[in-house]
Image (spheres, helix red, strand yellow):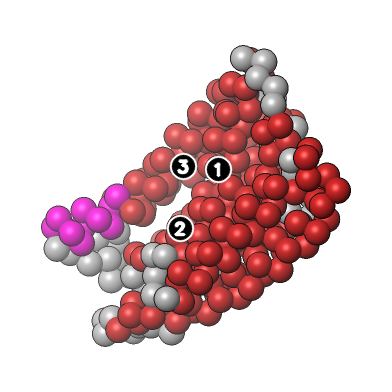
Amino acid sequence: MFQITILFLYFGAAIAFAMSRLPGNAGRARLLAGGAFALGIIAVVLHAQLTYTALIAGNSVAATAAVSLIGLQLGVIALLGALVQNLRGFSAGLLLLAALMALAAGPDDIADAGTALSWQMRTHILTSLFAYGLLTVGAIVAVFALVQLRRLKSAKLSAANQLFAPLETTESLLFAISIAGFTVLALSVISGFTFVEDLFAQHLVHKTTLSLLALVVFGVLLIGRHFAGWRGRRALYLYLAGFGILCLAYFGSRYILEQVLGYSWS
């Protein structure tokens, strides 16, 4: 029930933000945006309580709690982005995804009675999840940019265009997120090598290798952007490739180890 409440609050905020960007609602835009912020803030506060219960207060980190934490990041970033008027359509998309991710974790997740995590491992895990959350936002921005490119090439003009920020703004946002995500991911990898006692014994070799590969891909993207001015489809597809590798590093490796092979990361 608690998660359903969060779901509807996020949905309400997303719809209100989207409606505030439509030309027909210009006279009510401020009222719609104010209502959206109110619903969004309440949703984020409740989502934070749920995630704390499922993730921080427990003895181990369940995959569902990790997804919920990333969803919480999406909610926070969506509200921050909505402070810029032409990003409110983008924020609506983030809030819809945050709503779905909020369903992932619940209070029952803290029932896991595994071995308590040390502060070092908690630091590494939370840093990793923060990096995944940032780069997930970037993946959504990249998809938005691809949709914009397609609409521009096909010369499709409609009221729905108001939901999108200018393409230059979208690309600038993507690379700002890429820099932040790359930095936090690098810290995550470094903390992994520093705090993890035995990568082989804890079955973390595949995850670490794929994370390093994703880090290289994002690094190449940022270098290409800075020195060669990469943009457009090449940059967007390269970003999504790096994000795909990162998803495989965490979710793919964890699923195979725990569900198929019956091993644990800890």
Q: Where residue 185 sits in the image (x, y, percent)?
A: 52, 54
Residue at the left extreme, as displayed: 261
Question: Which residue, given by chain and number where applicable, does mark 2 sit on?
Answer: 100
Q: Where residue 244 sits in the image (x, y, percent)?
A: 41, 40
Which residue type does callout 2 highlight? Leu
Q: In the image, what residue occupies the spot 50% across and 60% down?
A: 99
- Alpha-carbon distance for marks 2 and 3? 19 Å
Circle 3 SS class = helix
Among the two numbered marks 1 and 2 on one chain, the one whose residue lies closer to the N terminus: 2
Q: Where residue 191 sits in the image (x, y, percent)?
A: 47, 64
Range drawn in magenta: 252-261
Image quadrant where one finds the N terminus: bottom left
Q: In the image, what residue occupies the spot 75% across and 32% down?
A: 166
Circle 2 SS class = helix
Question: Which residue, given by chain and number where applicable, does mark 3 sit on?
Answer: 243
Question: Which residue, given by chain and number where applicable, does mark 1 sit on?
Answer: 140
User: Who is closer to the viewer here, 126 or 155?
Assistant: 155
User: Who is closer to the viewer here, 187 or 246?
Assistant: 246
| Residue 137 shown in magenta | no
